[in-house]
Image (spheres, grey):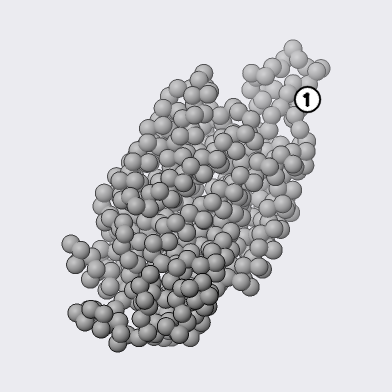
Amino acid sequence: MAEPIQSLTQFHSQGTEASPPSLDDMIEQSLGNFGWTQILQSLLVSMAMFFDAQQSFITIYTDAHPRWHCTTSNLTSCSSDSDICKLPRSSWAWDEISSKTIISQWSLECASSFITGLPQSSFFVGCFLAGFLLAAFADSSLGRKNMLFLSCLTMSIASSITVFSTSIWVYSAFKFLIGFCRSSIGACSLVLLTEKVRKEWRFRVAVLMYIWFTLGFLSLPGIAYVNRDSSWKSLYLWTSIPGIFYCIIAYIFVTESPRWLLMQGREKEAMAILKGIATTLAKGGGTSTSRLIKLPAKKSASTINFYSSINELFVTSWALKRLLAVMVLGFGIGMVYFGIPLNVGNLGFNIYLSVVFNALQEIPAFIATYFLDNCRRKPSILGFSVACGICCLICAVIGNELQIVKLCLALVSFFSVCSAFNVLLIYVIELFPTSVRNTTSSMARQAIVFGDIFSPFFISEGRKNDLFSYGIFGVTILSSAFSVLFLTETKGISLCDTMEQQERKESITV
């Protein structure tokens, strides 16, 4: 590793007289190699995605349509192929306890697609609205760490009080609150992870977030199976209470992004964090604290308006065009990414195994994402999106006669959209500078969530015809995928800190 510089004067003497040093270049030299302190920080930050995944997919079990059977006294008028809505209530019964899911507890077996899809759609509406209202907090007053902590804590608390729901309407209101609270977790986790490591580790450390998300997804079938004879409310308690304990631990041990602190003019705090990293590295033969670079102070926090990051985006034409293209792309990928696993109940397979199979697709997806570090972002996203769309369209037309083939195609499509989703989130980090990075990441996620809002309704209609679920998923992701062609390639670039630096760098590249 190259020797770190001690001051700006030394930095200029190393052949940089023609242009001033960027903040990214100086922080890169301070961070040094990837030591155990950064490993611990990365694990703690990314662990928030474990609980985020649980709340995102918990409705697979809590809102499912339970199995039913004909009662022995009315076999002549009832069969397994009968329409449950046309049978007398006395002629059939649920296979399990009546409080197994919200469908059986509140007698929603014959309710409209709007009613049955309302809770999960409310969850995504909450995410969508909160993203616009809260996105700028992490870039301005609260910072990445505090926003992550508050989002995860309030999400877990809101989830725990969902057990007091007395109707589908109250339950939907709680789901809206959970979605509102968790909206910033993904963006804050990813930004905080990538801003605290050197660029050669940026793509790889982000994979940790996907690993924790996958583990959270995989934990749901186990929790649901253990509680298979209990009410749906027990699932919310099993997932929310551990989340509260995690938040307390994370708040104590996780440090803030030094990049964000410097952008806020809080140089002493930033230097303390960087010195802690350097001290650890010095013990292992890395960067010495005495040779830690001196970083210039940025503008003070008092001069930073709350919505300055949003203003910067909308007054800069290239940034606005880039953001719109990212949001169109996110809309299609997001609808399918959450739609396919939420649709597993319509496949006709064991719901526990179906979720396990889908969750396991996340593993090869983040492995693929890891190896895509050295690949161009645009063709990677486009290729995976097209593959997903084609598989979804085939699923929509083959019907239920070839269930094994349909399951395999659904798994391939989910693997493809997972890979596209993973690369997209990292791609957004690289497309925008530090001053607006959390805001743009949040807005890209809002586009993803906006697509998710419609998924529950399509899934409910898909119980009757796959064209309303897989067909729409396929057409949507294929249509949105080509917006990636309007974006610039970012493979191997250094992160910029201001809009001006980003413009200068790209003008030189062009």
Q: Is residue 474 or residue 386 the one in the foreground?
A: 386
Q: Is residue 289 visible?
A: yes
Q: Please, which residue is most extreme toward the top here?
A: 76
Q: Quadrant of residue 156?
A: bottom right
Quarter location, residue 3? bottom left
Q: Position of residue 459 (x, y in %)?
A: 52, 36
Q: Percent position (x, y) of residue 499?
A: 30, 71
The residue shown at (33%, 41%) is 383
Relative to 354, 12 lies left or right: left
The residue closer to the viewer here, 11 or 397, is 11
| Residue at figure coordinates x 69%, y 29% from the top left | 67
**Total number of numbered discs in the rendering:** 1
The residue under label 1 is 90
SS at mark 1 in the image: helix
Seen from this angle, which residue lies furthest front? 285
Closest to the observer: 447 or 125?
Answer: 447
User: On the picture, is 85 further left or further right than 17?
Assistant: right
Residue 241 image point, x, y percent: 71, 58
